[in-house]
Image (cartoon, rainbow, N blue to C red):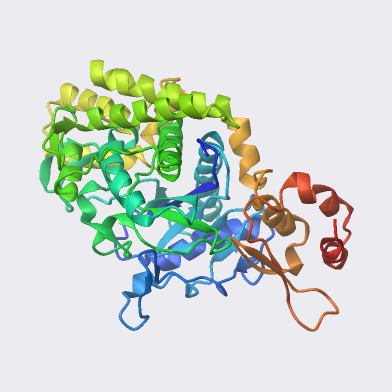
Amino acid sequence: MTVRRIMGLETEYGISVPGDPMANPMFLSGQVISVYAAAQGIRSNQSSWDYAFEDPLRDARGWQLDRQTADPSQLTDVEDPTLANVVLTNGARYYVDHAHPEYSSPEVTLPRDAVTWDRAGDAIALESVRLLAARPGQPPVNLYKNNADGKGQSYGTHENYLMPRRTPFPDIVRHLIPFFVSRQVVCGAGRVGLGVDSRGAGYQISQRADFFETEVGLETTLKRPIINTRDEPHAVADRYRRLHVIIGDATHLDVATLLKTGTTSLVLGMIEDGHLTEDWSIRRPVAALQTVSHDPSLQATVELVDGRSVTALDLQWMYHEAARTWLDRRGDDPVPDATGEVMSLWEEVLTGLGADVMSCAPLVDWVAKLGLLEGYRARDGLGWDDHRLAAIDIQWADVRPEKGLVHRLRDRGMLRDLVTPEEVKAAQTTPPEDTRAWFRGECVRRFTPQVFSASWDSVVFDVPGRASLQRVPILEPERGTRAQVGALLEQSGDVAELLRGLATPE
């Protein structure tokens, strides 16, 4: 594979009720999900999530964590008490996770599609806020696409990449840790304050870096690891591994999101192909992660185990050049335009950051935010410890276009967008055509009352006249595409007819 692989993004949105710090975030998150689902014609007892085959405690290092010893936050296979957990017509999952509304995008195959359906999630979050605000007597609820509240709490933006299980996990760890330590310079979201509670004065590259404590582990909310070991493929288990990446930031800028997913897919391709033979392991990688984040000048160096001292930009160039050599050697790219776009933008951003950091403001979140904050600092003489800058940092991520500062930059044409508003709007209700998300989303759209539940790898129907529920497995992520089942869905007047068609040999 090159940049093409099954991938998806998960975003937990920050939530608040202005003027009411004691508001229950889980209850409010449930309201956010439910009001949107109801507007789409999906009731809470329809198209809900199917937990039957989820296994969040299986570790990629070869063991199963006992449920009695697991932290409750790790038990993601337990229904949320708000019952706000639905599958949308675009194939996404929209639910409450750790007291936050979470949008998990449908599976896509290309980085640009990842951008499109991620932006669709932001539009869904905005519509949810507006629908809730229209309720009589409803207190205002705000959502923020960020990863830290400035008071010591962090919430995730996770990435998922499907890989062949034959790829040795130690190889994944060895080659990904240096990449993730340095990747933040091209896709960090920026944050005012240093340390988990933001008490240190300053500005840093990443929202998440200060919250990581270890190199490898199964946890996602405690003792956060650079490499997460959850082994829950949501696909044919002996064929695939799903790499669950928890170290990324919530990005608003299209180029940053494209590079976050596209460069990672390229590095995974090189690992799978055995192309990365040099060992670029970093001494004390957790400390290095934070050293890089705390230096927006990009001059800080980290020490490799071979004794070299390199900057994060140096490391990124090393991966870029390795990818260039690998692609030239392969010569069989199935999506050359998509790969070329990632490689070109990766080079442009690395070159720009090396020459003049601020030249990348239209492309990279942390740079765009830094430019905005420096404007306020120059105008009002503000130090980095001024509470007004922390407030601006939060306002940057407000999903409402009339409030969110990143939206103002977009409206003024100061950001380089890769997808159009029309594409984002379509992706709110339409699933990707080239993955199983098409079947899942179209079933919800066409047969909502009969979709009892769904998951990434199956759809469960409640068929009138049948004594038992009918499960349709979709363990191959590239089955159930529009090309494969579109005609059948069009021809099926009801679920029973659809199931008969699926049972007919091709």
Determine which quarter of the picture holds residue 454. Answer: bottom right
Q: Residue at x 44, y 45 (%)?
A: 272
Q: Is residue 470 above or below residue 398?
A: below
Total number of numbered discs in the rendering: 0
In the image, farthest residue toward the top: 355
Q: Residue at x 32, y 60 (%)?
A: 20
Front in this rendered view, residue 91 or 237: 237
Residue 180 relative to residue 334: left or right: left
Q: Residue at 42% across / 43% down in the picture? A: 268
Residue 362 visible in the snapshot: no
Question: Is residue 306 at least partly visible in the picture?
Answer: yes
Q: Nearer the viewer, residue 498 or 162?
A: 162
Q: Position of residue 266 (x, y in %)?
A: 44, 36
Residue visible at 28% across and 46% down in the picture: 177
Q: Position of residue 9 (x, y in %)?
A: 47, 48
Quadrant of residue 382 in the image? Answer: top left
Query: For residue 222, what is the image quadrant?
Result: bottom left
Quadrant showing the C terminus: bottom right
Taking the image as shown, residue 114 lies to the left or right of residue 196, namely right
Return the x and y of residue 471 as percentages of the image width and height: 71, 71
- Left or right: 18, with 196 as reference point: right
Q: Position of residue 115 (x, y in %)?
A: 51, 37
In the rendered view, would you say 126 is above or below 25? above
